[in-house]
Image: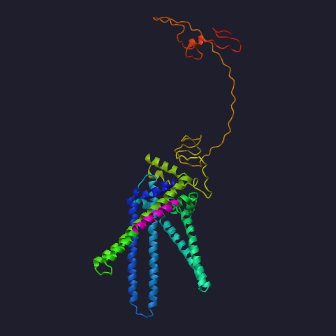
């Protein structure tokens, strides 16, 4: 697949199965946001009422405030874990849907969940590892800054050095994060489609992206830029409009219930649109990552041949049990730690070419002993080998004259005599000529022994 094909199909995936992808992603986003808002409001109200019930100067005021802060932190952790879990489900469902779409099938939500369920906890653990790694890096930067300021006695010079170090580390972490994110882009697809472990999926992603780093980075960057621009187009005008209308309707505040409800609706509506855009972004990014995974496996492991064979057998009526899973990795064809060989210039891989075939004028010509072109690719592409031209010397063959045989006229009962020049069948053991008369009329060349055909001259 080309760069433009991957980018275009990342957005067109929503049209393939919109009820499952878009509907489920939007439902997850709205569900998580609604639960988070309700829980935060309830906990904030409970905490405010609890603190207000303690008299000022009471010895219990400090422990109550500390408990409220701890409860808020715990709430934030729980909501984050829930968001990570549901986001992992969406990523897995997108990968599963793309895998079915690659073989021309549209799977319902139940079928997709059956494919994702065995890998759910691995997806969840991988998402947590990503968040934990980012948190540890932020703590390391903050700890280094605090150590520098503490070593300098929190003087102005030490604070300046600490701030400069934080800015430098943050800027340096941006290319590092982009590099690691791109190298590990297809981990969710490997977890779902190959049923790999977390460690195996990390290794697989690292090897599959090798040689495809810049196309993968370009596709994901453009998707993020397009969807980020769409989110800004939705949120910024909505926020401005809600602020202007709210100022016109109640410039000094209002206690009227209808106006309060209207102001809340103006504030919430842009956020709802932003959540919908975020859901679409999650689906498009997951689709792009899965397509990059398929493209890398097609290039390095001949996955396209396996998928073609799967579709052909399915069209012939093979059952799912007989077809098997086309995405299971064949160890003999899996990309290894050794970089895959680069294709020589001018070599064009044909989907139907058999291993070792030589492509001429677009038609595969398999070598003897090689599998048929319709079979899956099981080896490395054949490179043309130079063969030195073998000279062939012309062998002298002396001309052999054939004497013309006289054919007397033959009479047939009830018919006239045939002319001696009429075509006659050749004598046994003699070559056939188009016209025996020409053979008798034209003199033959003399043989080396001096013998001449009848009617000729020496």
Whole-percent x, y for residue 2 in the image: 51, 53
Q: Specify whether residue 151 is painted magenta.
A: no
Of residues 198 and 187, the one drawn nearer to the viewer in this rendering: 187
Magenta stretch, main secondary structure, is helix
Does residue 192 appear in this view?
no
Question: Which picture quadrant has residue 403?
Answer: top right
The percent coordinates of residue 431 (x first, y second) are 59, 17
Total labels: the figure holds: 0
Residue at 61% x, 81% y is 148
Looking at the picture, how far across and down is residue 257, in whole percent? 28, 78
What color scheme is it?
A: rainbow
Going 39% across and 75% down the picture, which residue do you hit? 37
Residue 441, relative to residue 13: is it above or below? above
Above or below — where is 35 with respect to 447? Answer: below
**Residue at image location 44% in from the left, 88% down from the top:** 64
Q: Compare residues 226 and 358 and report the one nearer the observer.
A: 226
Q: Quadrant of the C terminus?
A: top right
Residue 121 visible from this viewpoint: yes
For residue 62, side relative to residue 252 (left or right): right
**Where does the magenta region start and end?**
218-235
Residue 397 x, y percent position in the rendering: 68, 22
Foreground residue among 345 and 94: 345
- Front one among 144 and 317: 144
């Amino acid at each position: 697949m080309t760069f433009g094909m991957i980018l275009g199909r990342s957005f067109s995936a929503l049209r393939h199965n919109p009820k499952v992808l878009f509907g489920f992603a939007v439902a997850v986003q709205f569900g998580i946001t609604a639960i988070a808002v309700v829980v935060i409001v309830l906990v904030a109200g409970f905490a405010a009422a609890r603190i207000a019930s303690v008299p000022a100067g009471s010895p219990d005021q400090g422990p109550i405030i500390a408990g409220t802060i701890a409860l808020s932190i715990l709430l934030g952790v729980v909501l984050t874990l829930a968001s990570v879990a549901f986001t992992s489900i969406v990523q897995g469902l997108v990968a599963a849907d793309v895998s079915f779409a690659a073989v021309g099938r549209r799977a319902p939500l139940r079928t997709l969940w059956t494919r994702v369920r065995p890998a759910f906890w691995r997806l969840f653990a991988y998402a947590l590892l990503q968040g934990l790694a980012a948190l540890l890096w932020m703590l390391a930067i903050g700890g280094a800054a605090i150590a520098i300021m503490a070593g300098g006695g929190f003087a102005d010079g030490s604070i300046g050095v600490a701030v400069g170090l934080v800015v430098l580390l943050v800027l340096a972490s941006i290319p590092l994060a982009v590099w690691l994110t791109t190298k590990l882009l297809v981990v969710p697809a490997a977890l779902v489609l190959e049923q790999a472990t977390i460690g195996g999926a990390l290794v697989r992603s690292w090897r599959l992206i090798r040689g495809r780093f810049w196309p993968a980075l370009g596709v994901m960057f453009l998707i993020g830029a397009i969807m980020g621009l769409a989110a800004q187009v939705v949120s910024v005008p909505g926020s401005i409009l809600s602020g202007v209308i709210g100022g016109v309707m109640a410039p000094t505040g209002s206690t009227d219930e209808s106006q309060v409800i209207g102001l809340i609706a103006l504030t919430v509506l842009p956020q709802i649109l932003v959540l919908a855009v975020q859901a679409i972004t999650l689906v498009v990014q997951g689709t792009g990552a899965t397509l990059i995974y398929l493209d890398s496996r097609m290039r390095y492991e001949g996955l396209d041949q396996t998928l073609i064979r799967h579709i052909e057998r399915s069209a012939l009526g093979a059952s799912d049990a007989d077809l098997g899973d086309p995405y299971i990795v064949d160890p003999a064809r899996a990309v290894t730690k050794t970089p895959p060989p680069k294709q020589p210039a001018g070599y064009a891989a044909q989907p139907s070419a058999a291993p070792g075939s030589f492509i001429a004028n677009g038609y595969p010509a398999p070598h003897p002993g090689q599998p048929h072109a319709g079979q899956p690719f099981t080896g490395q592409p054949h490179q043309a080998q130079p063969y030195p031209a073998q000279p062939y010397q012309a062998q002298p063959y002396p001309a052999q004259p054939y004497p013309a045989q006289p054919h007397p006229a033959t009479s047939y009962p009830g018919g006239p005599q045939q002319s001696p020049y009429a075509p006659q069948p050749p004598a046994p053991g003699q070559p056939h000529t188009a016209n025996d008369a020409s053979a008798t009329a034209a003199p033959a060349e003399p043989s080396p022994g001096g013998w001449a055909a009848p009617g000729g001259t020496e």
